[in-house]
Amino acid sequence: MPTLFSFAFKNIKRKPLRTGILMFAIALLVSALVFSLSFVQRVNGSINKASERLGADLLIVPTNARGAAEEVLLENKIKSFYMDARLIDRIKVVEGIDKVTEQIYLVTMSTMCCSVPEAMVIAFNQDTDFIITPWLREKLKHRLEKGEAVAGTESSFNIRLGLVEVDSMLFGNVFRIVGTMDPTGTGLDNAVFITLENMERIVKSGKAKVKPGEISVIFAKVKPGIDPSAVAMRIENSIIDVDVMARKDIGKNILSTLGDMSRIFMMTIVLASVMAFFLVWAIFTAIANERSKEVGIMRALGAKEQHILRIFLIEVLVIGCAGSILGIVAGTALSTLVATTFSIVKQLSTDLSFLERSAIAVVSFLGGTAICVFGALGPIQRLKKMEPLMVIKVE
Amino acid sequence: MSQVVIDVVSKDYRVANETIAAVRNASLIVERSKFVSIVGHSGSGKTTLLSLIGGMVSPTSGRVLFNGEDIYTWTSDRLSEYRCEKIGFMFQSASLLPILTAKENLMLPVAFRSQRTPDGGHEQKAEDLLHSVGLSDKINAYPAQLSGGQQRRVAIARAFMNDPELILADEPTGDLDEETENEMMQFFLRMNKEHGTTVIMVTHNSDLARQTQQHFRMDRGVISHV
């Protein structure tokens, strides 16, 4: 027996080209939506994760190095910037500061074997550190000795270490990798970590740009109950040699750029949605005109308004759902393949989780299907109100 | 109780700025299980009268009663149920849905029933009805694969699918050859006699009209007993 479903499916198959065009339009819209949302979510998520996991309330860098520090932490870019190490003592005594630790960034592992990708070398203070140690996959059984290093998860993978200790070369000095960090979702994943004591060997060798008595960054924690922004302002007012970023401000520049890009994406999506809406409306208006006699026959045979509505809604839902699914597949592929050519995304250490991808797929699916349904609703509403007499009148 | 009562019904249409009176103060009583014919020229209001009885167009004035109830006091959904379960329609043309086979066209009204039996033997019934109108070999044919006469016979069979109490037939044998026309008339008479189905048939053919139990004539919207 023909059910309303089978009847609707027969109608869908009736004009395959028209159905295909409609599905393609929805698929295009949804793929654009998936691509945009994936892009924005990936950048946004990476920045949020980086600032959440940093472990410090304040990031203190040399004046004008704020952007470079963000690029190191958020975009995995390899940058170096230095300031006087004596600034640590001045920061420590600022009201509200609980503890501080410093790091030195070296430009590159320039003398490493050709098969090893470029990576940052970060020297940290083993006595005061609260940034690196929490991320060690296994607690070190001893303090890092001379000639020992810890690798970020990506660096570790890149130099094919895994958890196995293998010698590697840093600036012509032999180092043993004795630990690997858990993924942090920040630029730290692409670094190799050594202690300040080890750094002295590299500095003395003269192969790195850093000079004795210089550091790159100071991480600070503020005392409980103290507003980090207030402390940041206090530091900037009293020490002109540094820029200070509170945790919530990290990535602000990127987010601002991202905001502009998001708006462009959103405008494109809105325009595409409006176009898709009108396309669906135009096609369903044509369908309504074509089938008015059939609707009249069905009404005369006893179809209620809800039957007519259901038949057409099934049609539009099938088209919308199929188009949306196609769009999700295409958009996900696009975001995975093409987005790697976007430098801002290429540099990010964080990819989207399955949950995030699923959420984007669901939102895009609902968006695509809703536009299809709302576009068709006007013509369908007019059609379902058609009086059965129409069929007799047009005979 | 009378099954159908047309109680001083008028129906006007507005065309441009002109009012056309399609039915004027028509009164008609049809008893249950009667076979009634209405004859008249084109434009005399016969189709409008059937539409009024079928709950497809509301009267300008007057009442249409079915089993004692004024059908135009009902909601749209109840009118649809009335058309689906109480009435079997035959339009001036076959009016089949082109994407459905002959059998599926017959079963379409079943899909609109408010209460459906889980397995009411609908397929078998559709096949039996198609057999009754001589289309056993066209059960799975699409309307485009049928001749005009065959399409008309499918439409006749469809009208009986939901076991209606009342058949409203608008020139049901209009494009059939004489032999098939007679066969279909015998089919109507049999259904009327065996199942007690009331039939109101509009026709130009006075020979067919003479085979019915009551004859009415319509002229310029006015109905009169013959």
Image (tube, rainbow, N blue to C red):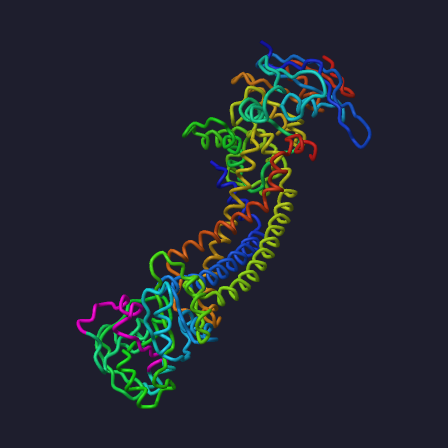
Please provide percent x and percent y for residue B158. Answer: 55, 30
Q: Main secondary structure of the magenta part?
A: loop
Q: How many marks?
A: 0
Residue B42 in view, yes or no: no
B132 or A305: nearer the eye? Answer: A305
Going 66% across and 33% down the picture, which residue do you hit? A391
B54 or A269: nearer the eye? Answer: A269
Residue A270, relative to residue B20: is it above or below?
below
Going 45% across and 64% down the picture, which residue do you hit? A249
Q: Residue furthest right?
A: B17
Residue B73 in view, yes or no: yes
Magenta highlight range: A116-142
Please provide percent x and percent y for residue A295. Answer: 60, 36
Assess whether residue B100 is covered by the magenta stretch. no
**Quadrant of the image for the C terminus of chain A?**
top right
Please provide percent x and percent y for residue A330. Answer: 48, 61
Residue A165, relative to residue B107: is it above or below?
below
Indicate left or right for A42 with B201 as reference.
left
Indicate left or right for A305 with B177 as reference.
left
B158 or A321: nearer the eye? Answer: A321
Going 32% across and 75% down the picture, which residue do you hit? A155
B81 or A372: nearer the eye? Answer: A372
| Snapshot quadrant of residue A356 | bottom left
| Snapshot quadrant of residue B210 | top right
Q: Residue furthest top?
A: B1
Please provide percent x and percent y for residue A207. Answer: 35, 89
